C-alpha cells in the first residue's frame, strides 16, 4: 500500500502539492511584476530544483507517497501521488525549466530603454504556468486531474508558439491548437466512459477494478488516440515541426523537452497501471509499428531540412517513436515478464535523457540563430569557432540522441535492446539500431558545418558565454544520466507497475 501523510514518520511537507502551487503562484506574480518579471528566473530556478530534490529524497525514504487534498481520500476526494516516475519527471521539469528561464532572461526582459515589451510580459506567466501544468501531470493520482494538467499545457504551449505574432507562428499555433483540441475531446470521452463503467477515475482504484471488457477497451483506445495527438506521436505529428520551428528558442526547448513527454507519461499510467490487460500481443505490436514508422519518417524528414530548428524538430518526431516500443517490449502478454521491467525503465530513461538533450540542443540552436540572424543550415559554417561552448553543447546533446555511450540515451536504448533480444523480438532491435544510424546522419550535417571554416563575410553577433553554458549544462546532465545511472534506475523502481519495491531505504 502507498504511504500517506498521516502515517508515522511521513514527511510533513507535501512536496507534490508544492511542486504545482509554486510555479502557478510565480505565474501570477510575474503577471503583476510586468517588465520586472524576468527577475523571477533565478529564484524560481533554484526553488524548482530544491523542491524536486526534496521530493525525490522523500520518495527514496518513504516509497510511494499519496497526499489527500483536504483530507478526503478517493473516490470522494482527490489524491496526489508521488512515486519514482513522477519524482524523476519533476526533476527533469525543474532542470530544463531552470535552463529555459535563465537562458530567456536576456531575450524576454525590458527593452534597451527599460520599457516593458509584449513578448516579455506574456512569456514569463506562460512559462511558469507551463511548468505548473507539467508538475500537475507528474503528481496527479487520477485521470481527471491529468486532463486538467493537459488543458493547462495546451493553453500555455499554444500561446508560447504564437508569441512572436508572425503569420507563420500564428498558423503553427492554430494547427497545434486544432490537434490539441481533438486530443482533448478524445481523452475526455474515454475518461467519461471509464467513469460510467467503474465509478471512479482514481488510478489506484481503477487498477483494481478495470478489466479488458468492451467499455474499458474503447475508453483506453480513445484516450490513447487523444494523447498521441498531444504528444505528436506518429502519425499525429503534423503540428510539431511548424510549432517548434516558429516558436522562440526557449519555448521550443520547453515544448520539445517536456510538453510532448507529459502525454506519454499519462500513456504509461494508462496502459501499465490502469488497464495492463488491454495490451494484447496484436495491440502492442501495432503500437510498436507506429513507433517504428515514426522513427523512420521523422529521421528521413530531418535529413531533408535546411533549417536547424526544423532538423531538431523532426528529430523529436523520430526520437518519440522509441517511446512506443515500450508496448511490445514491456506489454503484449497481459502479465509481467522477466524483461518487462527493463523495457519500462529503459523507455523512461530514454524520455528523460531526450528531454535534457533536446533542451540543450534548442538552446544551443537559439544562441547560434542569434549570432547569425537566422537558423539556415547554409549559414552555420564556422559558427563553432565563434560560439565554441554552444557548438560543444550541441555535439554533446547529439551524442545522447544517437544513443552513444556513456550518455543517458545509451542507457535507455541499451535497456530496450536487451529487452528486445530477451523477449525474442529481434526486429525491434533492428529498428533501434537503424534509428541510431539515421540520427547520426541528420545530426552530423549541422555538426560538420559548425566545425567547418567560415568563408562567408559578415560579422557574427555576440552571445554571452553564460547563456551558451546553460545549454552545455543540460547537455552534460544528459550524459551524466548515463554515467550515474544506478541511482535513477533504482528511483524508477519505486512504484513501478508490477513492482513490489516501495522504497530504497527498506
Image (spheres, helix red, strand yellow):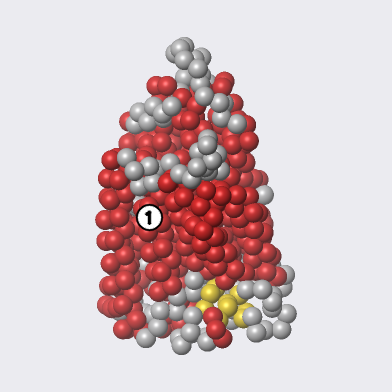
Query: Badge 1 is on which residue?
Result: 231
Above or below, 87 relative to 3: above
**Image coords of residue 315 (percent x, y):** 41, 40
Position of residue 301 in the picture relative to residue 90 (left or right): left
* Frontmost residue, 126 versus 140: 126
Which residue sits at x=53%, y=43%? 109
Q: Is residue 280 above or below residue 104?
A: below
How many residues crowd mark 1 within 10 Å: few (<14), some (14–19), many (20+)?
many
The reply, left or right, for residue 358 in relation to residue 328 is right
Q: In the rendering, at what x and y percent does residue 390 appear?
A: 56, 31
Foreground residue among 445 and 14: 14
Q: Is residue 128 visible?
A: no
384 up-or-down from 296: above or below: above
Query: On the rendered image, what quadrant is the N terminus found in?
Result: bottom right
Which image quarter is the C terminus in?
A: bottom right
**Residue shown at 50% from the left, 26% from the top:** 371
Amino acid at each position: 500500500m502507498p504511504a500517506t501523510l498521516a502515517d508515522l514518520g511521513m514527511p510533513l511537507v507535501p512536496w507534490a502539492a508544492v511542486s504545482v502551487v509554486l510555479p502557478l503562484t510565480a505565474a501570477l506574480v510575474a503577471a503583476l511584476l510586468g517588465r520586472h518579471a524576468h527577475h523571477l528566473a533565478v529564484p524560481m530556478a533554484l526553488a524548482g530544483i530544491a523542491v524536486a530534490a526534496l521530493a525525490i529524497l522523500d520518495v527514496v525514504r518513504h516509497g510511494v507517497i499519496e497526499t489527500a487534498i483536504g483530507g478526503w481520500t478517493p473516490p470522494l476526494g482527490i489524491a496526489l501521488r508521488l512515486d519514482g516516475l513522477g519524482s524523476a519527471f519533476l526533476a527533469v521539469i525543474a532542470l530544463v525549466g531552470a535552463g529555459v528561464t535563465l537562458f530567456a532572461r536576456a531575450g524576454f526582459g525590458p527593452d534597451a530603454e527599460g520599457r516593458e515589451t509584449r513578448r516579455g510580459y506574456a512569456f514569463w506567466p506562460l512559462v511558469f504556468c507551463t511548468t505548473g501544468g507539467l508538475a500537475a501531470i507528474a503528481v496527479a493520482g487520477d485521470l481527471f486531474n491529468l486532463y486538467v494538467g493537459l488543458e493547462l499545457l495546451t493553453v500555455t504551449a499554444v500561446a508560447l508558439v504564437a508569441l512572436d505574432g508572425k503569420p507563420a507562428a500564428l498558423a503553427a499555433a492554430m494547427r497545434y491548437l486544432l490537434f490539441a483540441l481533438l486530443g482533448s475531446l478524445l481523452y475526455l470521452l474515454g475518461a467519461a466512459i471509464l467513469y460510467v463503467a467503474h465509478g471512479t477515475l482514481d488510478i489506484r482504484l481503477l487498477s483494481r477494478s478495470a478489466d479488458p471488457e468492451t467499455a474499458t477497451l474503447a475508453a483506453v483506445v480513445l484516450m490513447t488516440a487523444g494523447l498521441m495527438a498531444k504528444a505528436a506521436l506518429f502519425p499525429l505529428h503534423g503540428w510539431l515541426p511548424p510549432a517548434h520551428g516558429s516558436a522562440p528558442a526557449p519555448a521550443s526547448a520547453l515544448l520539445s523537452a517536456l510538453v510532448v513527454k507529459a502525454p506519454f507519461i499519462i500513456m504509461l499510467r494508462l496502459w501499465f497501471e490502469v488497464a495492463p490487460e488491454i495490451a494484447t500481443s496484436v495491440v502492442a505490436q501495432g503500437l510498436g509499428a507506429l513507433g517504428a514508422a515514426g522513427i523512420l519518417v521523422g529521421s528521413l524528414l530531418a535529413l531533408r531540412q535546411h533549417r536547424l530548428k526544423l532538423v531538431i524538430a523532426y528529430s523529436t518526431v523520430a526520437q518519440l517513436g522509441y517511446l512506443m516500443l515500450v508496448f511490445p517490449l514491456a506489454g503484449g502478454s497481459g502479465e509481467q515478464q522477466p524483461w518487462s521491467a527493463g523495457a519500462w525503465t529503459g523507455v523512461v530513461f530514454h524520455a528523460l535523457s531526450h528531454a535534457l538533450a533536446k533542451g540543450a540542443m534548442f538552446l544551443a540552436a537559439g544562441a547560434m540563430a542569434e549570432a547569425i540572424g537566422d537558423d539556415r543550415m547554409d549559414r552555420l559554417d564556422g559558427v563553432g569557432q565563434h560560439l565554441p561552448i554552444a557548438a560543444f553543447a550541441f555535439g554533446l546533446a547529439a551524442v545522447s540522441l544517437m544513443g552513444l555511450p556513456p550518455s543517458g540515451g545509451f542507457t535507455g536504448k541499451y535497456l530496450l535492446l536487451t529487452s528486445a533480444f530477451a523477449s525474442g523480438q529481434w526486429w525491434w532491435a533492428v529498428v533501434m539500431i537503424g534509428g541510431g544510424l539515421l540520427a547520426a546522419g541528420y545530426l552530423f550535417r549541422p555538426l560538420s558545418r559548425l566545425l567547418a571554416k567560415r568563408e562567408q563575410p559578415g560579422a557574427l553577433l555576440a552571445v554571452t558565454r553564460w547563456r551558451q553554458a546553460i545549454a552545455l549544462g543540460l547537455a552534460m546532465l544528459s550524459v551524466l544520466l548515463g554515467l550515474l545511472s544506478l541511482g535513477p534506475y533504482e528511483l524508477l523502481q519505486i512504484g513501478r507497475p508490477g513492482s513490489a519495491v516501495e522504497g530504497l531505504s527498506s
